[in-house]
């Protein structure tokens, strides 16, 4: 079964959301800040398998699978994602 979100997608999403990266042993962590406050984070596996699943990202970013793919593919911007977060009450 093909993964919806791969490591490649996870890295693209982290860059698009201007995440600060933190490295620990087997994982890299992408931490997303808004007004100097950590609002979301997700792990990026350090596996050599390109299609290693990162399907937890949707849950971690409070979005659906389609929105996660749009973040990775460019139609959804950081500002769009912040608006989604605001609409769901995660930002003040």
Image (cartoon, grey):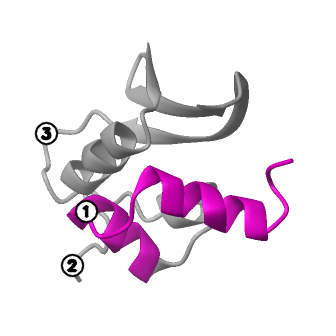
Graded by Cα atoms within 10 Å as few (under 14), some (14 to 19) or many (20 or more), the crowding at tag 2 reads: few
Of tags 1 and 3, the one toward the viewer is 1
Asked which quadrant contains residue 32, the reply is: top right
The residue located at (51%, 63%) in the rendering is: 80
Could you say which disc has been placed on residue 56 in the image? Answer: none
The residue located at (47%, 29%) in the rendering is: 29
Q: Earlier in the sequence, mark 3 or mark 2?
A: 2
Q: Secondary structure at mark 1?
A: loop
In this image, 3 relative to 86: left or right?
left
List the residue tagged with mark 3. 48
Cα–Cα gap, marks 2 and 1: 21 Å
Could you say which disc has been placed on residue 2 in the image? Answer: 2
The secondary structure that dominates the magenta segment is helix
The residue located at (44%, 75%) in the rendering is: 67
- Where in the figure is residue 74, as x and y percent of width and height? 25, 62
Part of the protein shown in magenta: 66-92
Graded by Cα atoms within 10 Å as few (under 14), some (14 to 19) or many (20 or more), the crowding at tag 3 reads: few
Asked which quadrant contains residue 63, the reply is: bottom right
Q: Secondary structure at mark 3?
A: loop
Of tags 2 and 1, the one toward the viewer is 1
Cα–Cα gap, marks 1 and 3: 25 Å
Tell which of 8 and 51 is nearer to you: 8
Q: Earlier in the sequence, mark 2 or mark 1?
A: 2
Could you say which disc has been placed on residue 74 in the image? Answer: 1
Compared with 92, 52 (above or below) is below
Cα–Cα gap, marks 3 and 2: 16 Å
Compared with 58, 49 (above or below) is above
């Amino acid at each position: 079964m093909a993964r919806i979100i791969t490591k490649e997608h996870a890295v693209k999403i982290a860059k698009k959301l201007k995440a600060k990266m933190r490295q620990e042993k087997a994982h890299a962590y992408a931490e997303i800040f808004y007004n100097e406050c950590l609002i979301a984070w997700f792990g990026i596996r350090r596996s050599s398998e390109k299609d290693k699943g990162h399907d937890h990202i949707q849950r971690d970013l409070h979005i659906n699978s389609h929105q996660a793919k749009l973040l990775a593919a460019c139609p959804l911007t950081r500002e769009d994602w912040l608006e989604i977060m605001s609409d769901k009450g995660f930002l003040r």
